[in-house]
Structure formats: structure tokens, C-alpha cells
Amino acid sequence: MLVLYYAPRTRAVRIRWLLEELGTPHELRRVEFKPPSKMFTQDTPLGKLPVIDDDGVLICESGAIVEYILERHGDGLLAPAVGSPQRGPFLQWIHFAEGTAFQPVGTLVWHTFYKGDADQVPTVVETARERAHAGFAFVDEALGDREFLLGEEFSAADIMMGFTLGVAEVFELLDDRYPSLVPYLARLKSRPAFQRATAD
């Protein structure tokens, strides 16, 4: 059975949410999150969160795990078929959610919660906020009046983006300058699978 090493309020939420959406049997192996004073300190086989163990196949990095689970256990759900016109945009959003949108938010997390020196590096914090807003404006414009990133169909790209936006919400980065993004996040949070994945 697939094992997910999990701690609440970490990127492991993405994987738990995906597994709940798919209805994939799995074991949730809870670990206590350790503030990252240095890399690879989590109590998981690879020292990171999240990590999955799928019959001996160990993988970290939430985006890679999402793609792996969809290929191995997805049965064609939550992702456009390889070669379809929507496959490119799907992959774009999978990677944009972490590589572009989350990166400046991660800077805020680092200086606010882990280093506790946000007031000492105001330029770094302000630059991170500006970069975050640029990324969210890009997503907001792309969404327009669509329900989800790919249109009317929910996909795993929305799971990747939903976690990023949830963290951004904590930092009050989402406001009325994003007429599409704010209701989009509300739709994601209303999904039963999301609610099950974040109940704790």
C-alpha cells in the first residue's frame, strides 16, 4: 500500500488532498514537522516532507509526487491525457504553483516563522510580496471567469495551486485586486476531499 509521510500545514497536504480526490487507498504515516534549521531533517526516509513510499519506490517533492501518483494510480482522472491540447497548460500550472507562485511566499514563511527576522529585512520582505503579487496577478488573469485552471474540469493542477494560495491567504496576500483568484480559492476549499485532507 502507498504510504504518505505527512505533517499538517506542509506541502504534504497536497498529496493527501490528491489521494482523497482519487480515492486511492493509502496509509498516512504522521510525523512531527521540524522547523528547517537545516535541510533534510524531517523524520522521513528522505529527510523531507512530503515523501511517499509506493511498494519501495521513495519519492519527495510534491509536484513530482503528484505526477507519479496520477500516472501510477490516477486511472486517467484529474489530468489531461498525454498529447492532448490541455496537457501543456496542465504541466505549466503544476510547476508554476510551486516554482513561481510559491517561491516568494516561501521567503515570507522563512523570515516570519522560521528565522523570525522579517522586521530586520524589510526590503527582502517587500520584494517577496511584490513578486508574489506579480505571480498571483498572472494566475488571476488566466482564470478569468473559468471555474478551474483548465476550465470547467477540476484537476491536480488546482491541488498544487490551492495549497500555494492557502499559504498566501495566511499572509493576507489575496485581496480584491484578484476578482477571480479569491472565489477560486473558496471553491477549492469547499471541496469535500480538501476538507477531509485538512481536517486536522
Image (tube, helix red, strand yellow):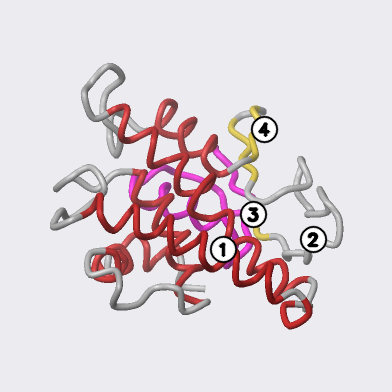
Residue 43 location in percent, x, y?
79, 53
| Dots 3, 2 in contact, CB < 8 A | no
Between disc 4 and disc 2, whose residue precedes? 2
Q: Disc 3 and disc 4: Cα gap in Å?
A: 14 Å
Q: Amino acid at mark 3?
A: Arg
In what element is the residue under mark 4?
A: strand
Q: Disc 2 and disc 1: Cα gap in Å?
A: 16 Å
Q: Which residue is mark 4?
A: 58
Q: Which residue is mark 3?
A: 29
From the viewer's perspective, is 97 left or right of 151?
right
Would residue 100 be counted in the magenta stretch? no
In what element is the residue under mark 1?
A: helix
Q: Which residue is mark 1?
A: 105
Of 34 and 167, which appears nearest the observer?
167
| Dots 3, 4 in contact, CB < 8 A | no
| Dots 4, 2 in contact, CB < 8 A | no
Span of residues in magenta: 1-29
The circle drawn on residue 36 is: 2
Q: Disc 1 and disc 3: Cα gap in Å?
A: 27 Å
Q: Could you classify mark 3 by the number of other residues whose Cα lies within 10 Å: few (under 14), some (14-19), or many (20 or more)?
A: few
Q: Amino acid at mark 4?
A: Leu
Q: Disc 4 and disc 2: Cα gap in Å?
A: 21 Å
Residue 116 location in percent, x, y?
77, 78
* Front tag of 3 and 2: 2
Q: Could you classify mark 4 by the number of other residues whose Cα lies within 10 Å: few (under 14), some (14-19), or many (20 or more)?
A: few
Give the vertical position of 170 relative to 18 (above or below).
below
